[in-house]
Amino acid sequence: MPNDTASGYVLEMLGISKSFPGVQALNDVTLKVRPGTVHALMGENGAGKSTLMKCLFGIYREDSGDIVLKGAKVKFHSAKDALVSGVSMIHQELLNVPDRSVRENVWLGREPMRSFGPLRFLDHRKMHEDTAALMKSLDMEIDPADRMGGLSISKQQACEIAKAVSYDASVVVMDEPSSSLTETETEHLFRIIRDLRSRGVAVIYISHKMSEIFQIADEVSVMRDGRMVGTYAASELDEDGLIRLMVGRDTTDRFPPVASVPGEVRLEVRGLTAANPRSFRDVSFDLRRGEILGIGGLVGAQRTELVEALFGLREVASGEILVDGGLVRVRSPRDAISHGLGLITEDRRGSGIFPLLSVTVNTSVASLGRYLGKARLLEHRRIESEAAKLNEALRTKTPSMGTQIQNLSGGNQQKVLVSRWLMTLPDILIMDEPTRGIDVGAKYEIYTIMAELARNGKSIIMVSSEMPELLGMSHRIMVLCAGRHTGTLEGKQATQENIMRLATQFV
Amino acid sequence: QSKSSKPVIGALIRNLDEQFVADYAANVKVLAEKAGVELKLLDSRSDQATQLDQLNTLLSQGVKYFVIVPNQTEATEQMAQAIAKKKGGAAFSNIQPSVAALKVGKNFFLASSPESVAGQIQAQIIDDYFQKNPKKLGANKTINALMLLGQLGHPAQKYRTDAVLQGLKDKGYTVNVVAQDTANWKPDEAQQKMDAWIAAFKGKFNIVITNNDGMALGAVESLLTAKYVDDPKDLTKDTDGDGTVLKVPVLGVDATQVALKSMSENKLYATVLQDSVGQSSTAFELALAMAQGKYKAGFEAWGLKPETTPGDEAPANDAAVIGQCYLVPFKAVTKDNYKEFVK
Amino acid sequence: MAASSTVTAQAPARGLRAFLSKNTNIVTFVVLALALGALTGGRAFGLDSIQNLLIAESVRAFAALGVGMIIITRGIDLSIGYVVCLVASVSASFAQTPDYAAALYAGKDFVILVPIAAGLMTGALCGLVNGLLVAYGKLPAFIATLGTLSIARGLQLIYTKAAVVGSLKQPFKNISQGSLGPVPYLAIYVAFAAFVVWVLLRHTRRGTNFYAIGGNPVAARVSGINVERELVMVYLYAGVLYGIAGVLQAGRLGLANALTANGMELDAIAAVTVGGVSQTGGVGTMGGMIVGVLTLGIINYGMTYLGVDSYYQLLMKGVIIIVAVFMDMNKNARR
Amino acid sequence: MAASSTVTAQAPARGLRAFLSKNTNIVTFVVLALALGALTGGRAFGLDSIQNLLIAESVRAFAALGVGMIIITRGIDLSIGYVVCLVASVSASFAQTPDYAAALYAGKDFVILVPIAAGLMTGALCGLVNGLLVAYGKLPAFIATLGTLSIARGLQLIYTKAAVVGSLKQPFKNISQGSLGPVPYLAIYVAFAAFVVWVLLRHTRRGTNFYAIGGNPVAARVSGINVERELVMVYLYAGVLYGIAGVLQAGRLGLANALTANGMELDAIAAVTVGGVSQTGGVGTMGGMIVGVLTLGIINYGMTYLGVDSYYQLLMKGVIIIVAVFMDMNKNARR
Ligand SMILES: Nc1ncnc2c1ncn2[C@@H]1O[C@H](COP(=O)(O)OP(=O)(O)OP(=O)(O)O)[C@@H](O)[C@H]1O
Ligand SMILES: Nc1ncnc2c1ncn2[C@@H]1O[C@H](COP(=O)(O)OP(=O)(O)OP(=O)(O)O)[C@@H](O)[C@H]1O
Ligand SMILES: [Mg+2]
Ligand SMILES: [Mg+2]
């Protein structure tokens, strides 16, 4: 795309401010993006990244400031205006229509049409073929006719990527596109991004995964507390320097030491097989007191299915679950919780937050049973202080504990969910992608808490697609591939290469 | 506490969606206008609780005299007591008040005919019809009737239905109800039921009795569309001379203008006039007389004197209150006289 | 219930399941029809019975198609009954025989187009108001349409002074009452409307937008769909369909009054739900709506035909609706 | 209070806005009350007027509290009117004077507890059926309760044979009709029920569960809430409240028949929506429900007091509901 603006920028956001009740989300933020570059937008949770992009995309109206696109001042009143003007966006939260097919989702709002005299009708065939071609060009194996809601989260994410790319936009915003992708898929995404860049498209890339930034970004803008700290060439920065800019202070290690020594077996799983024949089968493993067990694998390895089955959310065909040596039946999350389990699910919106309820309620909802006082009435004061304490420990950024959780940034919502399960004081905490969308600083807090839980004799299962996290935090790493347990790695064996080998055993 | 010199009369009306009630209310408005009375007319939308609330509201505004078309007989005593507390009075129309309600005080009146009279008159019309057309009757004086009922549990539905059946029995007929169902006073529902019944019972019924004109007209329309008529080639020909182009007579109640129009076209056979003008005028004149302090026992309202001898239906069957009962007759509306009622 | 996305269907079962999942409603309908046939020794299915069924359900079918589309967009419409009532009254008032003394416009003889146009416009206007309230007023559809229900009811009574609007001209009535050979006009109109709705839902961008808005309004918006405009349109279309329903109802009966079509909203909503249109939005087909209407139709018709006591009719109708939707809901409830 | 020290709230805006956002409903109510006061020169607010208002709205208030809780769990209940009607009829049938020849149990004299218990149990049973259908039958609440509506209606007619159940004993009527000094018993019952609902919603685990289920049923399940059981409970509680409403209604009128409480569901739902209970679930308070009931009450009362023509009343009621909810919806619509 020719560099058609005198300034050399395809997009300039000048002095953008935006406030929500109780929060100044953006304060005089300026962001300038050159065509044909990948521009990383960094910042802690709640720094204002998504808000800034939503202003660009016409979802929010900025209180003040100007947006200049390709040299012309623009004012978008809706997403449609933005799309028409050549801005497309992958949203932080999955936004699709689950009951419709992939192809309908991809072309939503701009379906190919066919004319019958004066009448225009959908061209279903072209829609299918275009989708197939798009998927092929992006090396994605997704059937255009599949129901969107039937796909795994990562495939849904892939569809979002395909959709955003297909707009032929001059600016593509990607708000944490890789948060539900594994590293292989992220690599794939990067190929797509590089291709866009070579075609002169400007990509604004938001992520909390440091390593990605240095792989892909040309320039990095850093935000902190709703202000722009500055824009830097990626080559000028290193990881620590970037973190310092984001957090405003020095950080030390990325992972705290996991000092606990696994003790006796708390949880034993024998030959667990899902009722759904396409899911996991014959999985056996055990989990010890004070142990952090990582579960790795490619997307589609059925890790989520496995932990959800453990938690009573999915039907099991056969197999046994033993807690502290006793056979248990887990038919519902309630059963699981009563056996001391906790689960942070991977789908924050779908199965995590109660959008309209306060941070306090969102934190305490699973542990109210422990806060019943006289006449079994709730002890609000204790609940509030405990919830506040947990959120403070994770540095959840919220105007108040009474704020509706939907008004928190994505990462801060995730922190509240972590608090929720910490509050249940589980013996065995299962965390499915626990640090998804969480900034570096807060990740460290979560890791610290995990380490401390382990030291106090709790056991943790952590499903993660982030290799460093798996390697850095786990005592042992169990690897799944296509629903089967292909091996467990321990000590020196636990290397990236070995995990990948096991994870691709049947692929 | 209205300080205006005008007398104030409250009108508590069951439901203006009902034809009779709407006509009743319209006439009360006209009368009030003429008499220079401030009228407070309220519609309870068929809800007795609402009517009670409305009464309380008017009482608290200082209104003392009422014309009332109640929702239920059983609620009249309570309303009378509330009015009596404020030393007021009321005349009840359409749905009769209970004896107990009239016993609350001498200022409470019946200005109506019981709903059952409508049924009795229907029975009379049917008797006349079969007297004139004995061939239409089944063996052993059997009447094979299709019955379309009003909203179930509605007083008019209950009393009209019971009375017509009883009346026919009393006249020596065997009544075989081929099918009966509610159409909730609605023409459209009546039409639908009738459509199905024509399919199911073709040739097996010789009369259609309904609780109101609306449903009667729905039934008429259904019979016409199904060509269940004397002469399918000409829907306007009454070949057998029984007074209707339809194969069977259809009867309604209300004598609405549309119904009369239908009768003029030999479609609807007959209907019954519940005299909305008569009832409302009687009730209004009673209320007005009380408001002006002119009422005394034996007062003549709308040319009617109160009854003197107890009849057989409550409340006019109780000697203690007979002087408070003004019976406004229902009228059969047939071929012979329908023109009188066309406005 | 799955915590995250749903489980993929098992490949072999898929064909069968897809078939079943599309056809539970039809199965229910067929079972009921067979039951009725068996109970009456087939007598319930003479030509005139089928004609009756078609005629009886046709007006409701328009309402169902309208509210079906609305429910697809995650809305609801409680105003149907009184809007149809208002339309029927307005339409009828322009179709009264001029010699009828009690006519609203006594002495005036309007061409047949007037009552039709007046009815359709009234329906469209009501739909438009609903649409504006829901789309731009951000009112919950339940409340917006509850409000217009009350307004339409008031207007009908004010307009007609609670009197019956009757004595309609035969040419006007013929529009509803005529038939082409054995096929009633009404059935033809329904077929045509159903076809248009099918094209709209399946083959136009707007239809796709309706599903998207019902499935995920936020996703629809960020895909560049003008959610507000589309919502206005769906209520407007529904309003036009109610308009047709009202005009035809008036013609069919030869009159309109305050009770015309009362409660039709519940029938129509029940019908489309039985037909598989989901109240959670984004799901439903034209075929399902029509099957739903016919299913409720055969229940009503069958019970009337069999002469079931009216008290028990109410009871059985409740039970059958519950059972039908239960089967539809739980057909693919296996996790 | 703030979990993080990083964000400071804008203190001044918060107080005002929080106040406003909690009180739009109250504002609406106050405005309407003042308008009525002004129009009548204050006469509309004598002691007996206020008593009338309280009495008139009390029965509806029970229904509103019940359906309000249901709506918080993202449900709906269309069966209210006929359930209250059935309850009133059953209850009344055990409270008829034994010497009344047309009594359902003529000659039988039941102690006063019998009609009360029978009514409450009938209500609870209806609620239970609704709850089971919604929770375990997975039926959309709209349809489940539409089904029970029809069933309750049928049962009422079968039980009473469509007759009025009247001539109730004075002690039974006194339960509803009495008053403690100037305060009607009915108002006291409502206050008590409202207090219980407030405790339930605000101070019990179950109440929080209701909000959670309404807010996100999947997340509620994952959080260990027994969603099915809680749903059954909310419909059961509502059923008990309808039971109370029915018993009191019978006592208040001294009778029950097929028309008792018809349409109460729409009034109750409109009231709680005006009071800020959101149809999308998870939002609403006891206070809002009561304010909503009073708001609709003052509309009805005011129009009655002012003698607005009933046709225009319908029209205005529709408009006022729309405006009230519109203001509530759009109070914090700025993005
Ligand atoms: N709709 C809203 N209403 C109120 N406050 C909001 C809203 N959206 C965002 N905020 C607030 O604005 C701030 C910025 O949020 P934003 O989502 O932009 O953060 P972010 O940088 O994208 O964080 P993350 O990395 O966690 O996604 C946060 O404090 C958040 O609480
Ligand atoms: N190939 C597939 N097609 C459709 N659905 C799938 C497929 N694989 C998994 N799913 C479903 O998607 C959901 C999430 O599974 P996912 O693919 O994310 O597996 P996972 O190994 O748990 O991946 P993640 O790395 O995201 O945890 C599960 O409900 C699963 O049943
Ligand atoms: Mg964000
Ligand atoms: Mg997963």
Image (spheres, coloured by chain):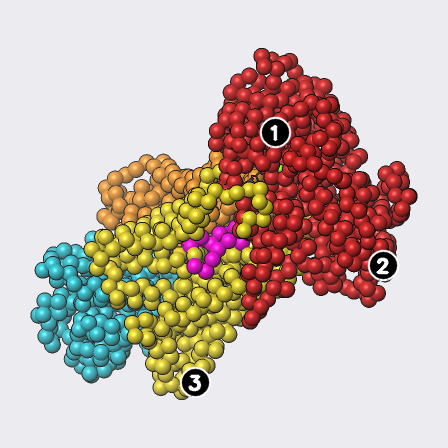
Chain colours: A red, B cyan, C orange, D yellow
User: Badge 2 is on which residue?
Assistant: A263
Residue A417 percent location from the top left of the image: 65, 50
Q: Is residue A321 magenta?
A: no
Reading the image, the residue beneath label 3 is: D110
Closer-to-camera residue (D116/C279): D116
Q: Secondary structure at mark 1?
A: strand
Q: Is residue D192 left or right of residue A38?
A: left
Label 2, residues with CA under 10 Å away: few <14, some 14-19, many ≥20:
few
Residue A402, above or below B132: above
Question: How many marks can you see?
Answer: 3
Task: Name the residue tied to disc 1.
Answer: A229
Q: Please state which amino acid type lies under the numbered disc 1.
A: Val
> For the residues marked 2 and 1, what is the alpha-carbon distance in whole angstroms?
47 Å
Dots 3 and 2 on the same chain: no
Residue range corresponding to the magenta coloring: D273-287
Q: Chain of mark 2?
A: A
Q: Is residue A127 left or right of residue A305?
A: left
Residue D8 sits above or below residue A206 on the image: below
| Secondary structure under the numbered disc 2 in the rendered image | loop
Q: Position of residue A41 (x, y in %)?
A: 65, 30
Q: Are marks 3 and 1 in contact (CB under 8 Å)?
A: no
Residue C153 placement (x, y as % from top left): 35, 51
Look at the numbered discs 2 and 1 and tell me whether their residues touch, using CB distance below 8 Å.
no
Q: Secondary structure at mark 3?
A: loop
Residue C277 in the image: state x and y as whole percent.
Answer: 57, 48
Q: Is residue C268 visible?
A: yes
